[in-house]
Image (tube, rainbow, N blue to C red):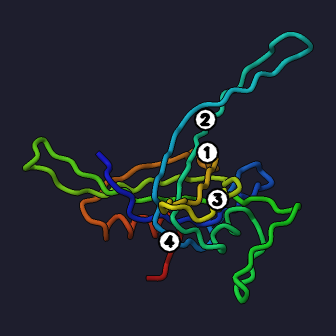
Amino acid sequence: MLIGHERQGYCQITETAGADGTVSETLGTGVITSHVVNFTGTRGTSSTDVYAGDTLEDSEDETTGDVKFELSQLPLKDEAAFGGHNYDTAKDLMTEADSDSAPFFRYGAIGLGRRGATKADMKNFYRLLMYYKVKFGPVDDTLQTKEEKPTYKSHSVSGRCYPNAGGKIREKQDFDTFEAAIAAMKTFLNITTV
């Protein structure tokens, strides 16, 4: 049973097709970013039908998935990265243009869980969710005037998962310690600094 979300991170990926048709993947430098309030990851299949005139000739299935997470805070630099937008560090300014194209990312999230046969046997574990190729959609902005009772809004980000060049969509791995889970996430996201 997963009971909480500890960390998330991402790194941009670039795929290059070789002359022989093989596809190679290059990882950018990853980052670990803000805590997530809520995370949902699903896996599914989408189907495309191919017609010749009025006759169904073929049907192709593609394994895909979706991720959706809500954050209490989403720094503009992360929002800019997800959408392929320009970000000016000096001004903390994101500029979204009509010609922007969202890149693909690796995405990782660590959840805290508890397991055991009995209540006395319950122990914490940390599950690392690794998504190999995600394209994020636009970030939802929610503004609200002050009301009598405070309400708390979160930023919502959704993405579509695809198989990478090696055919992988996602992996999950459990760890006994948070330190081991974060080390594995750093490796997955190409993070070499402390």
* Residue 73 against residue 129 in the figure, above or below: below
Please give the name of the residue rendered at 92% of the width and 14% of the height, measured from the top-left corner: 53
Q: Earlier in the sequence, mark 1 or mark 3?
A: 3
Q: Earlier in the sequence, mark 4 or mark 3?
A: 4
Q: Position of residue 60 (x, y in %)?
A: 71, 26
Mark closer to the observer (2, 3): 3
**Which residue has dot 2 on it?**
63
Secondary structure at numbered mark 3: loop
**Mark in the foreground, 1 or 3:** 3
Circle 4 or circle 1, nearest the eye: 4
Q: Residues within 10 Å of mark 1 (few under 14, many from 20)?
A: some
Q: Judge the density around disc 3: few (<14), some (14-19), many (≥20) Cα neighbours within 10 Å.
A: few
Q: Position of residue 132 (x, y in %)?
A: 56, 53
Q: Which mark is residue 163?
A: 1
Amino acid at dot 2: Thr
Specify which label sits upstream in the sequence, 2 or 3.
2
Identify which amino acid the numbered label 3 is placed on: Thr
* Callout 4–callout 3 Cβ contact below 8 Å: no
Residue 31 relative to residue 53: left or right: left
Q: Nearer the viewer, residue 10 or 191?
A: 10
Please state, as top left, top right, bottom left or bottom right, where the N terminus lies in the image.
top left
